[in-house]
Amino acid sequence: MRQRLAVGNWKMHGSLPENQALFEKVAVAAGALSRAIAVVCVPFPYLAQARTALAGSKAAWGGQNVSQHPKGAFTGEVSAGMLREFGCRYVIVGHSERRQFFGEDDATVALKAKAVLAEGMVPIVCVGETLAERERGVTEEVVGRQLSLVADRLGAEGLKASVLAYEPVWAIGTGKTATPEQVQAVHAYLRGALAAREKNIAESMPILYGGSVKAANAAELFRMRNVDGGLIGGASLVAEEFVTICQAADS
Ligand code: PGA
């Protein structure tokens, strides 16, 4: 049975008082889940608050980005070791906003995933096509290339300890969700690509969907055979929305 996950990606949102209320609700909701894990990936300065608020609960927390370097003169960067010190269990790598606005390429994403694994945490590796790429009919080629570079670098052992997230760029923050059939098709392709490397990994690796997941559409998306939960942006900032999404991932 594959691990089911509902991962909130807060992006650059939050404030100490707002977070506190949200953490408390997430902690309660996480306690009621039987097979899914609720995770919140918060901005770096709020990791200490996440640790205090969520320690002892069944919720996990993580980072949204990480340096590929273990330490050194890299002003403004945060290492995987630092994230681990704050109790992170998951780290998002290769989010399309990092690729688009901060110039991260596949090779960098692979190094970041490796840095996360080296500290015993789980990288949530994001792949996804732009609207232009979907319209050109090269979705599989794009996500296949993104996956393949990371997979080469991580090897079977690393892949086994990772999570994959399919996030079509055109569906992120746009309110335009991919249909369950579109999602299922890409997830099946990704699982097939993993199986071509190693069957066991393909069967055990959670593949999450992200892109305008909301309380209203989570259940129909997560019901698809190859979808193991979601990576949730905007809706993860609204407690009631995120709690319902966690429950959908659990059922
Ligand atoms: P969204 O973001 O749910 O706001 O579309 C998803 C993501 O970027 O992970």
Image (spheres, grey):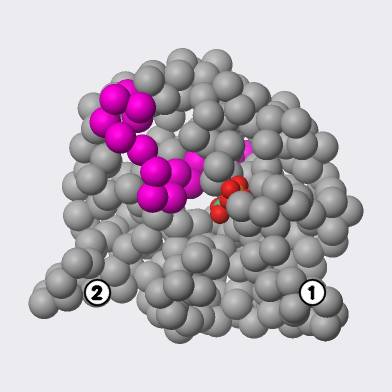
Number of residues whose C-alpha sits closer than 10 Å to that of mark 2, classed few (under 14), some (14–19) or many (20 or more)? some
Q: Is residue 211 visible?
A: no
Residues under labels 1 and 2: Cα distance?
33 Å
Height in image: 208 above or below 51? below
Looking at the image, the residue that sits furthest to the left is 73
Q: Which of marks 1 and 2 is in front?
A: 1
* Residue at image coords 79%, 74%: 134
Which SS class for mark 2?
loop
Is 137 left or right of 244, judged from the image as shown?
A: right
Q: In which quarter of the image is the N terminus?
A: top right
Quadrant for residue 248, please give it: top right
Sequence-first disc among 1 and 2: 2
* Residue at image coords 32%, 63%: 66
Quadrant for residue 10, please give it: top left
Residue 6, percent across and down? 57, 38
Height in image: 151 above or below 55? below
Give the camera-side residue of 235 and 108: 235
Q: In the rendered structure, which amino acid carries the disc numbered 2? A: His
Q: In the rendered structure, which amino acid carries the disc numbered 1? A: Arg
Looking at the image, the residue that sits furthest to the right is 181
Is 6 included in the stretch rendered in magenta? yes
Give me the disc on residue 134.
1
Is 122 included in the stretch rendered in magenta? no
Residue 18, percent across and down? 35, 27
Q: Mark 2 points at which residue?
A: 69
- Specify start and end residues of the magenta stretch as a single range: 1-20
Number of residues whose C-alpha sits closer than 10 Å to that of mark 1, classed few (under 14), some (14–19) or many (20 or more)? some
Residue 234, percent across and down? 55, 42
Q: Quadrant of the C terminus?
A: top right
* Residue at image coords 84%, 51%: 179
Which SS class for mark 1?
helix
* Residue at image coords 83%, 77%: 135
